[in-house]
Amino acid sequence: MTPAITVDPLLVERYIMELARFGAVGESGVSRTVYSPEWVQATDQYAAWCREAGLAVRRDAVGNVWGRLEGTDGGRAIVSGSHIDSQRPGGRYDGALGALAGLIALRTLKEQFGAPKRPLECLAFCEEEGSRFPAANFWGSRAINARIAPDEPERLRDYDGVTIGSAMHTVGLDPARIAAAARDDIDTFIELHIEQGPILEHAGLPVGIVTGITGLRHYVVEVSGEANHAGAFPMDLRYDPMAGAAEIIAGVIGTATSLGRPAVTTVGRMRVEPNYPAIIPGKVTFTIDARHPDPQALAQLYASHEAVMREVAQRRGLTINWHSTLDLPPSPSDPATVALLQAAANDLGIPSMLMHSGAGHDSQVMAQRARMAMIFVQSRDGRSHTPEEFTSVEHAVLGITLLAAGLYRLAYTP
Amino acid sequence: MTPAITVDPLLVERYIMELARFGAVGESGVSRTVYSPEWVQATDQYAAWCREAGLAVRRDAVGNVWGRLEGTDGGRAIVSGSHIDSQRPGGRYDGALGALAGLIALRTLKEQFGAPKRPLECLAFCEEEGSRFPAANFWGSRAINARIAPDEPERLRDYDGVTIGSAMHTVGLDPARIAAAARDDIDTFIELHIEQGPILEHAGLPVGIVTGITGLRHYVVEVSGEANHAGAFPMDLRYDPMAGAAEIIAGVIGTATSLGRPAVTTVGRMRVEPNYPAIIPGKVTFTIDARHPDPQALAQLYASHEAVMREVAQRRGLTINWHSTLDLPPSPSDPATVALLQAAANDLGIPSMLMHSGAGHDSQVMAQRARMAMIFVQSRDGRSHTPEEFTSVEHAVLGITLLAAGLYRLAYTP
């Protein structure tokens, strides 16, 4: 059912290394933020490689670059891609590998099987990381799904105060035309991405098939007590928010740990006031990031975290407040597409496992209008958002081969 | 054995309020750092009141102001005082009340009993808080005890970069003469100070007699793990220093709490790196302030804190390092002087309790060359280092009366 597909490892390696020159930082870092000169060069290169592969190239109204292979029977498109912007600095693989994977899969399929029945497209999303405009995450995929609010071009600013609308003008894009980027003719979207975690490496597998993207909530928790002299206040008369915060943090991390995979809870940020060694703090503020891909388990995770917060604050006579700054429901993959990728992996003898994504991706936005699935390839040491992130060409080739096989099934033998 | 001594509450109130004008901030705040214009005015006022009381006034080489009542039999001096500098802003009572208490006690004793047998002195220390020169704490008492290093005048700088030597010059003091401030003729030093804690208020007592000043250590603890993506790393593969820090903090605070008074342990300061909500921290740095007035119990407190740190780090595979930035042994009061103050309180019917000081004071420096004791007066809500600190005139009068009675026993009926 799945024919042999040969992805050229030299081409994969060359594209990865050449794309990484645009915004190169040091030995292996990449700093390439949306609408920067190096971003323009990278998208030009991507467009040139699309043309070289015989694809029709198009830039949309926000700067996403599309390569299209028409289908003999027409119909809704089968699309694969990822983002071409990076952290600052990130590495060569986060996003870039998926944008190249779509391009290489289409080039390979065209070379080996000619024209598909249904249209195939590859895609480099202009922006996903929010690394230049902190509130712009998923700019490219949001434009495609008509999810950019009319005031965002003038409202979102980068760290130098430049609006994203003004940044668009500098690269020849008109923010007034953003709505033109929307599409409603995409049938299926498959994104290949590095795992960014250690699960595949620990399992000894090159490839994961993603059953869904986690739901998550970011809490900001404020615990207030009474700031007092560290020497003159006996323990039994204190209202120490640090004592309460430590218990809460140990509690919520302990909850996620005992629930086991795939529940995760992280406290990554804390502010202490007044933050002097010899003063009992008056206020401790910290974040809780809690995630689970299953909606019911996610609700239970939130409820147990909130119960710990209430219990500790009440027992210690502390004032506690929390609010959430981010609240994303889980985004399940399309089960039929997951099954199709599993079957293709079995046919091709590519060792794989089902897993969820603990990180957010353009795919969760694309899932609003299209069937969605993702392919993960192994990350060394689970690292990402750093110049040290690494995925071997061997694993990348296996991932792209599986992607190409999936696209083949969808577009050549629908 | 102790005669009736009448301290004038109107005088106490007037001196407190008038001294608080120098460096006044808002309704009840005082910001008066060493060698500032307002500090000069306050020391001038203190000197004028000493003269008014019939005392011989002297400013020493660092700017401590002394008032002296000669003794008919001569001999080593009996001294009482406290510091005249403040936090920025602090309140009207921290330090100032004790400097005034010594002055008012001497004035009262002279008025009511004439000349003492042994010399009596009152004292306004120039600096205790370190609120202008962060490394200058106890500058006044250190000068008296020959504990200022020769390089300090040029080495210690304020927040504007001015050296303390240069600041001395601006008020007419020569840093080359610091050694001349040293004294070795002080027999007993008694400091009256606000409690800065809630113990007297909870006990319903106006006055405490201090059996010693706590020993303390400041630890800086660094816990390192692996910074990783909050979504992509399962709990069982994390090396999360925040999880370890929370357990350690809950552990050390729990240890001091279960030991009970007078053990105290505080975590007042924390830094998280990189400090983003969605990144497992790579490093968490925090302080531990641990105190106990008993040397053996203090050593046990330190040992149990270090055991918790080691155990948690080892169990979680985290790297831990700690060093101490401050390490002060307990400074016991002179038992005979404590007993004398207790007896005087009983004679006068002043309700009091024995207690230790959890905060540092000039008295611990003075104890290096003299018999030392302290008298605490009640602080409302245990507050200090804030414009809201408050001690009633009634309680201040009882404290000063007890101080005067102690000085009477030492200087009039030795």
Image (cartoon, coloured by chain):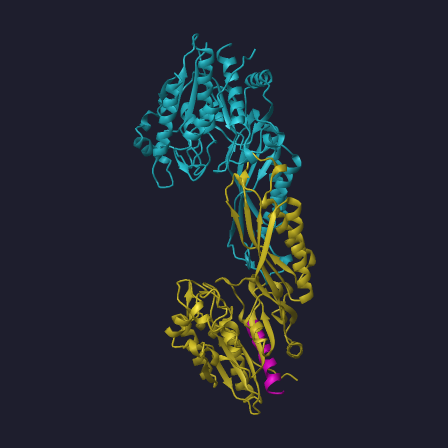
Chain colours: A cyan, B yellow
| Front one among B235 and A229 | B235
Q: Position of residue A325 (x, y in %)?
A: 49, 37
Above-or-below relation of A163 to B319: above
Residue B144 lies left or right of residue B351; in this view the side is left
Residue nearer the viewer, A284 or B255:
B255
Residue A301 figure quarter: top right
Q: Nearer the viewer, residue A52 or A402?
A: A52
Q: In percent of the image, x 55 and y 13: which residue is there?
A: A2
Residue A158 pos. (x, y %): 37, 38
Q: Which residues are magenta?
A: B394-414
- Which of these two is toward me, B342 or A33? A33
Q: In this rendering, does residue A147 appear at all?
A: no
Number of marks in the image? Answer: 0
Q: Is residue B77 left or right of residue B132?
A: right
Q: Is residue A228 visible?
A: yes
Figure check: A251 above or below A233? above
